[in-house]
């Protein structure tokens, strides 16, 4: 059975790990609660909590992200439904990494997908 109205739009928030320069100089601004699909933003005077359909912390693997969102969308597309994955965020926030994996895999992934006739 295809997507329901509830499945129309879902948001996965993925928090990237800090790069080395951020670890030394940037204060910790949020905590991730994957059990509750929430982030806690350290705002003044009180923390602010945001909830999403799925939350992935800095240790979440590519395979886990795919299992959370990609697999269902691909299955629905193969069953004739429309699907779309959008990675949104500022420069350096991890969009390309989330969509394609580590940068050393970008060229080989592109070439491999062309061989098989499906480019996702």
Image (tube, rainbow, N blue to C red):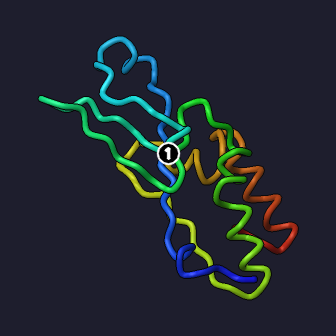
Tell me the residue at 35%/46% (across/down). 50
Q: Quadrant of residue 79?
A: bottom right
Image quadrant occupied by the C terminus: bottom right
Q: Nearer the viewer, residue 51 or 26?
A: 51
Work out whether 86 lies above or below 107.
Answer: below
Work out whether 113 lies above or below 80.
Answer: above
Q: Relative to 49, is 18 on the left or the right?
A: right
Q: Residue furthest front?
A: 36
Q: Nearer the viewer, residue 118 or 36?
A: 36
Q: Relative to 73, is 10 on the left or the right?
A: left
Q: Quadrant of residue 1?
A: bottom right
Tell me the residue at 35%/49% (across/down). 90
Residue 68 screen position, x and y as percent = 66, 54
Q: Residue furthest left?
A: 45
Packing grade of label 1 (10 A; few <14, some 14-19, many >=20) is some
Residue 3 screen position, x and y as percent = 64, 79
Work out whether 38 lies above or below 83.
Answer: above
Residue 17 screen position, x and y as percent = 49, 29
Q: How many marks?
A: 1
Work out whether 89 lies above or below 79.
Answer: above
Identify the residue position indicated by label 1 in the image: 37
Q: Nearer the viewer, residue 29 or 21?
A: 29
Q: Relative to 87, is 70 on the left or the right?
A: right
Judging from the image, what secondary structure is the residue with disc 1 in? loop
Q: Residue furthest right?
A: 116
Residue 2 screen position, x and y as percent = 70, 82
Tell me the residue at 39%/52% (across/down). 89
Tell me the residue at 65%/51% (across/down). 100
Q: Residue furthest bottom?
A: 80
């Amino acid at each position: 059975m295809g997507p329901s109205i509830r499945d129309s739009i879902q948001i996965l928030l993925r928090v990237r790990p800090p790069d080395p320069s951020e670890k030394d100089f940037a204060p910790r601004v949020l905590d991730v609660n994957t059990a509750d699909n929430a982030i806690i933003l350290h705002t003044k005077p009180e923390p602010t909590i945001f909830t999403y359909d799925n939350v992935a912390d800095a240790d979440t693997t590519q395979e886990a992200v795919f299992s959370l969102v990609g697999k269902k969308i691909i299955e629905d597309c193969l069953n004739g439904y429309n699907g779309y994955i959008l990675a949104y965020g500022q420069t350096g926030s991890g969009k390309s990494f989330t969509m394609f994996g580590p940068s050393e895999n970008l060229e080989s992934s592109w070439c491999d997908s062309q061989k098989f006739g499906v480019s996702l």
